Image (cartoon, rainbow, N blue to C red):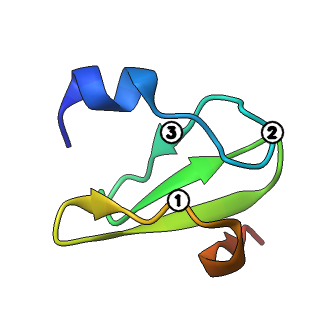
Amino acid sequence: MDEELLEILACPKCKGGLALSIDESELRCEKCRLSYRIDDGIPILLIDEASSIE
């Protein structure tokens, strides 16, 4: 994922920063403990589509 894009993306729930997972398959918000999947290079930043970080 492009570093410039990653810098401007924010969690839709808390507006905090997002971190790219090691395998680059999802963006994670540590504050909300939610992960947002990335489909074909496009982050799906919908709260209803997010999954909990265990």
* Mark 2 closeness class: few <14, some 14–19, many ≥20 residues within 10 Å: few
In the image, residue 17 lies at what x, y percent?
Answer: 61, 29
* Mark 1 closeness class: few <14, some 14–19, many ≥20 residues within 10 Å: some
Which numbered dot is residue 9? none
Image quadrant holding the N terminus, namely top left
Q: Do the residues labelled 1 and 2 touch (CB within 8 Å)?
A: no
Which numbered dot is residue 19? 3
Q: Could you tell whether 20 is left or right of 31 in the image?
A: left
At label 2, the amino acid type is Cys
Q: Residue at x 70, y 66 (%)?
A: 47
Q: State the CA–CA distance, disc 3 to disc 1.
A: 13 Å
Q: Which residue is drawn at 37% across and 52% down?
A: 22
Image quadrant holding the C terminus, namely bottom right
Which numbered dot is residue 45? 1
Between circles 3 and 2, the one closer to the viewer is 2
Q: State the CA–CA distance, disc 3 to disc 2.
A: 14 Å
Between circles 3 and 1, the one closer to the viewer is 1
Q: Could you tell whether 39 is left or right of 17 in the image?
A: left
Q: Could you tell whether 22 is left or right of 40 in the image?
A: right
In the picture of the structure, the residue carrying the numbered disc 2 is 14
User: Toward which corner of the image does residue 50 lie, by quadrant?
Assistant: bottom right
* Mark 3 closeness class: few <14, some 14–19, many ≥20 residues within 10 Å: some
In the image, residue 28 lies at what x, y percent?
Answer: 58, 51
User: Toward which corner of the image does residue 37 lie, by quadrant?
Assistant: bottom left
Q: Which residue is drawn at 82% across and 40% down?
A: 31
